Image: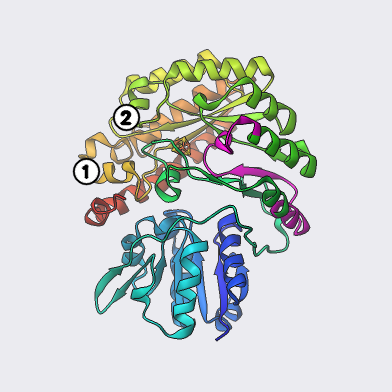
Amino acid sequence: MTLRILVVSPDYYTYGAMVVGGVCERWGARVRLRREPDPESLRSADVAIFSLHSTQHLLRKDVIRAVRRAVEACRWVIVGGPVSQVPELVLERFPEVIVAKGEAETVLPPLLDALAEGEDLEEVEGVCLRSDGDVVDTGWPPPADLESPRPLKVPRGLGEQDIRGANVYIETHRGCAGTCTFCQVPCFFGREIRWKPVDAILEEVRELMRAGARRFAISGGTVTMYGDDEEDFVRLLAELSDLVGRENLSAPDVRADVLNERVLEAIRDHTIGWIFLGVESGSDRILKRMKKGITVDDVREAVELARSVGVRVAASLIVGYPGERDEDVEATEELLSELMFDDVFINVAEPIPGTELGRLVVELPEDEIPILQPGERMETLAGDRALQLQLTAFTTLSRPVPLSDDVYEEAVKGVREEERKVARVTRFLREHAAVLRGSAR
Ligand code: SF4
């Protein structure tokens, strides 16, 4: 039986959704890729696959409506992507769907075989579904072998989408050896790093360029962990930049303790010349709680080295981590003043299901979780602190931003959106505490 499959990637076409589409096509299905399912594409699909990369998708009304419409219109609805880390949580939201866990390359082909042949889904490795009122979970599928080529289903018009400045985030490797409590990468892809051959990456990029993509960022956790050693990473950047142009390539996310001069020179010579350093906090106490594996001194050294090479440094910060105190936030403000970053991005600590932080927020009392504490200027204590850090960041940047009324209002608006989003997720997880407690892998 030839299956007609609609792959839905809310908001924008993620690399993961393109892999899902490519895997389905290689299996033999007729595949369409959409950001939202229109009635016609739903009517003509046997299977709808929702590739969901954020917990927000389980809470957003438009996504919930789209999944419900698909359940009514299609024979089968599958939910996959990073939300499959805690499949019971997906089933709480969407009881009628089949959750495809883990990586598309290994979970989808046997699942599609079983659907097409009418076989028992409980025999397929890596799925979770409701059957006669019970949740049936068939374990985790094996990790994919990234050495072999993987076709992508590439939609047209990629050049029109903007994901934090890039048209598309490309994947060079999976996994991360880090232990950061807030991060999903090692939970979902494992702590062992698997990488793709450079030629395979270049082939994918050519295909994405044919679909209109021009600006590329490298995803996959910490970019400099690619390859056997730093020379592999240097070669990767050199070849990518030859293909797309250095002004169109960024290698954003790096750890302070896996940088050296050679790697930074390659970032300077073959990319837009910025790093986005996972600083997270200026307090060693909080870095320890986050199991970040670096100290504030590591950050100082990394910034000094990057600047000596001519690479600009943006800091990525997390505020509102459980157990955070006022003095931790003050330490981060002091670090901002001391290092005068070229840019600063502030996120409220978002508990992702399946991570250690995701479990922590369901165990701790509310008064240890800043996003659940009332704020003075903002709705929550985490919001107050995020705003405080944002205002400090503006005035301490290497090129300070004057604090006009407009800038202040914009900052308040951004923080309000962020705190509401994280508060919603945190409450959702606490409502499903029992599910989260059993989610350790
Ligand atoms: S935050 Fe970065 S270093 Fe930490 S586990 Fe995630 S990808 Fe690895």
Q: Count residues near mark 1 (Cα–Cα under 10 Å), then give few for <14, some for 14-19, many for 20+.
A: few
For the rendered model, the colour scheme is: rainbow
Tell me where residue 312 sits by quadrant: top right
Residue 321 x %, y %? 34, 34
Would you name the residue on which mark 2 appears? 289
Q: Within 8 Å of ligand 1, the CB of disc 1?
A: no
Would you name the residue on which mark 1 appears? 363
355 or 192: which is nearer to us? Answer: 192
For image coordinates 68% across by 45% down, the residue present is 198
Q: Is residue 222 magenta?
A: yes
Tell me where residue 59 sits by quadrant: bottom left
Indicate the amino acid at tag 2: Arg
* Above-or-below relation of 165 to 306: below
* Above-or-below relation of 341 to 122: above
* Above-or-below relation of 297 to 251: above
Indicate the amino acid at tag 1: Glu
> Distance from label 2 to label 1 (Cα)?
15 Å
* Above-or-below relation of 39 to 426: below
Mark 2 or mark 1: name the one nearer the start of the chain: 2
Q: Count residues near mark 2 (Cα–Cα under 10 Å), then give few for <14, some for 14-19, many for 20+.
A: some
Residue 217 x %, y %? 65, 43
For image coordinates 22% across by 36% down, the residue present is 367
Q: Please indicate, yes or no, whether residue 4 appears anywhere in the rendered image.
A: yes
Residue 274 x %, y %? 65, 29
Identify the secondary structure beneath mark 2: helix
Is residue 12 rendered to the left or right of residue 57? right
424 or 204: which is nearer to us? Answer: 204
Is residue 415 rendered to the left or right of residue 247? left
Q: Within 8 Å of ligand 1, the CB of disc 2?
A: no
Which residues fall within the magenta stretch? 204-231
Q: Are marks 2 and 1 in contact (CB under 8 Å)?
A: no
